[in-house]
Image (cartoon, helix red, strand yellow):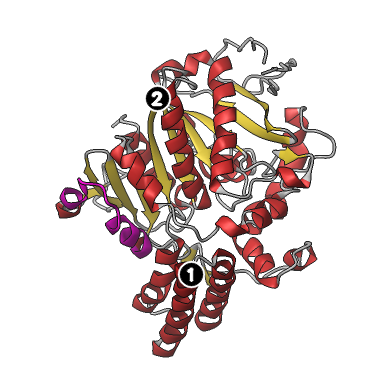
Amino acid sequence: MELAPRSCPVPPLLLLLGLSTGAVINWPTEESKEVWGYVTVRKDAHMFWWLYYATSPYKNFSELPLVMWLQGGPGASSTGFGNFEEIGPLDHDLQPRRTTWLKSASLLFVDNPVGTGFSYVNKSDAYARDLATVASDMMVLLKAFFDCCKDFQTIPFYIFSESYGGKMAAGIALELYKAIQQGTIRCNFAGVALGDSWISPIDSVLSWGPYLYSMSLLDDQGLAEVSKVAEEVLDALSKKLYQEATKLWGKAEMVIEQNTDGVNFYNILTKNSPVSTVASSLEFTQKHLALLFQRHVRHLQQDALSQLMNGPIRKKLRIIPEDCTWGGQAASVFLNMEGDFMKPAISIVDSLLEAGVNVTVYNGQLDLIVDTMGQETWMRKLKWEELPKFNQLKWKPLHSDPTSSETSAFVKSHKNLAFYWILRAGHMVPSDQGDTALKMMRLVTQQE
């Protein structure tokens, strides 16, 4: 592989490297730094990554874990939303984030699948169309990363994720485990965390009605309507009609919005903003896909964040191609993955557990799109032999603030499986409950 190092004189925390495919990189040695670059993962497919070294005042980065964060969508950007809206060192106003995970871990943000964020493709046939390709692409990136960044080969490496990123994380984690076993990637893989993850879409869809009904957001008639369309999704999936199931999933969301006066799928205590004209202006051939993109990707690329990424951040990075716009290919990423949306990944989680990989599942109490009821349902379907013992355990309360009696979460853990119920959080747990998310990350990475 050929590496193209790039560097320039910049202030602390603004160090720059460009990575494409073979040469040695001279990594900077001073404290508080970042590096970023591209990896060509396939012909015409280029993936962007951004690494922040941990900034703990008490420990060197080599004494702390490395966390890779994967966003959802598919088509939502880790280097944008995850970085500036959730766990990175700065918020979208470029002000320090009090609850950044950088205090306790080095952070690796990757824009995947290719075409997401600052990642891009040169030809339309280079987009990923399934989970297998997404995982294969990430293996190329991770091999390049760990080969040139040897300091991180022995540091515990965790994959944290959110939403569709959780489904991708499961597939990536399994392929990484295999690659390490085969000796093709040198890495101290310590576990994967699946946050509000689209692991079993049908279990989410089937639980929407009962969940909303229990929260007084559906009446009897509304529950019947939502349950009816959910059964239609189930029927399509049982016939392996995945694109039809995707269409019906979109229909189910519309039925919910009509019956709940526009409940927000990412936090049921708030309301959706009206669908903008952005979706209709995109080259979608089917309306339901335009609406799904608008609801599940476009909202992660709000104008303010887009202006930040395509303005000051792009200027800082210096290696973004002129014809590449942050988020510019997101719609195409989403469209090309259409056939993969409704496929379950429960068997992948089972394989991870059987292999001894540490798996953490965490979910926000107020999330609808991937509600906790649905997560609990698919977990009961696991064939892992230790599952009965896990199920018999009682959960334990967590308190983010040791001076307060307020419960911030509940947790249950057995062997290499853990589940966190995060209270007062929606779909984006670190955004809604930053202190709790940070505490959970520290527990998962065995720092507490």
> Where is 316 relative to 430, above or below?
above
Q: Which mark is residue 181?
A: 2
Structural distance between the alpha carbons of marks 1 and 2: 36 Å
Q: What residue lies at 54% left-to-right and 70% top-to-bottom?
A: 249
Q: Position of residue 188 (x, y in %)?
A: 40, 23
Q: What residue lies at 46% left-to-right and 27% top-to-bottom?
A: 179
Of labels 1 and 2, earlier in sequence is 2
The crowding category of the residue bearing disc 1, from other C-alpha atoms within 10 Å (few below 14, some 14 to 19, many at least 20), is few
Q: What residue lies at 44% left-to-right and 37% top-to-bottom?
A: 173
Q: The residue under label 1 is which amino acid type?
A: Lys
Q: Would residue 53 be found to the left or right of residue 363 on screen?
A: right
In which quadrant will I find the N terminus?
A: top right
Which quarter of the figure has residue 180?
top left
Closer to us: 66 or 144? 144
Q: Does the magenta-highlighted stretch encompass residue 394?
A: no
Q: Which residue is mark 1?
A: 239
* Residue found at the far bottom of this picture: 221
